[in-house]
Amino acid sequence: MGETPLARQAHWAGPWEVEPIPAGDSVLHAVTRRGEPASASEGEAPGARLAFLRRQDALLAAASLAALASPNHLSLSQGKKGGRLGHPIHEGSRHLGHVGPAVRGAQGEFLVAFHTARCLAANPEAAALLVEALDTETLGILGRAIMRRLG
């Protein structure tokens, strides 16, 4: 029997934190639910859902978990063509747009990436993790791009 949508959302919703944990001669960056310990006490299961060598990768993974909290109901209408616009994109019965010929061969990957982006846009905690993962130079470029777009 599959997981219910509410159980899935509760399991993956977070909020997530990234914290360093010792791993032999190095340090791993663990993704944990806020308030849960990353490393286990003796006899307990570890709280870390994911662990990475680079903090940036752990932050990106934590941000990506928002996409697991929300079921992906995006689909392409393969049998229908939207004329020159390509295949229609739907979320359930709601029409969202079209995937044109330039995306041919990567439609499935596009739907996963689009779903993830929509989840990040809807989850400020996850979006903050994504921004935190940016290096200083990229963060400056992002700030200028936002000002240019909103300005």
Image: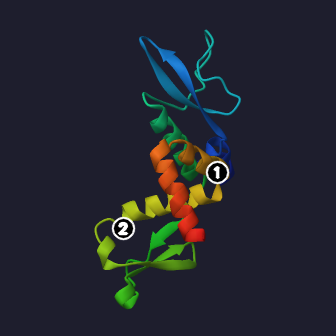
In the rendered image, residue 83, in percent from the top left (x then y), is placed at 37, 90
SS class, disc 1: loop
For the residues labelled 1 and 2, the Cα–Cα distance comes to 27 Å
Q: Answer left or right for 87 relative to 97.
A: left
Count residues near mark 1 (Cα–Cα under 10 Å), then give few for <14, some for 14-19, many for 20+: few
Q: Residue at x 60, y 55 (%)?
A: 70
SS class, disc 2: helix
Look at label 2 and name its amino acid: Gln
Q: Identify whether 139 is placed above or below 103.
A: above
Q: Residue at x 57, y 72 (%)?
A: 92
Residue mark closest to the camera, 1 vs 2 = 2
Count residues near mark 2 (Cα–Cα under 10 Å), then give few for <14, some for 14-19, many for 20+: some
Quarter of the figure with residue 48:
top right
In the rendered image, residue 64, in percent from the top left (x then y), is placed at 52, 47
Disc number placed over residue 107 in the picture, else none? 2
In the rendered image, residue 44, in percent from the top left (x then y), is placed at 62, 16
Disc number placed over residue 82 in the picture, else none? none
Q: Identify whether 43 is placed above or below 94.
A: above
User: Which badge, 1 or 2, is on the more N-terminal residue?
Assistant: 1
In the rendered image, residue 40, in percent from the top left (x then y), is placed at 60, 16
Please indicate, yes or no, whether residue 134 appears anywhere in the rendered image: no
Residue topped by disc 1: 4
Please indicate, yes or no, whether residue 85 appears anywhere in the rendered image: yes
Q: Identify whether 27 is placed above or below 137.
A: above
Q: Identify whether 32 is placed above or below 75.
A: above
The quadrant the C terminus occupies is bottom right
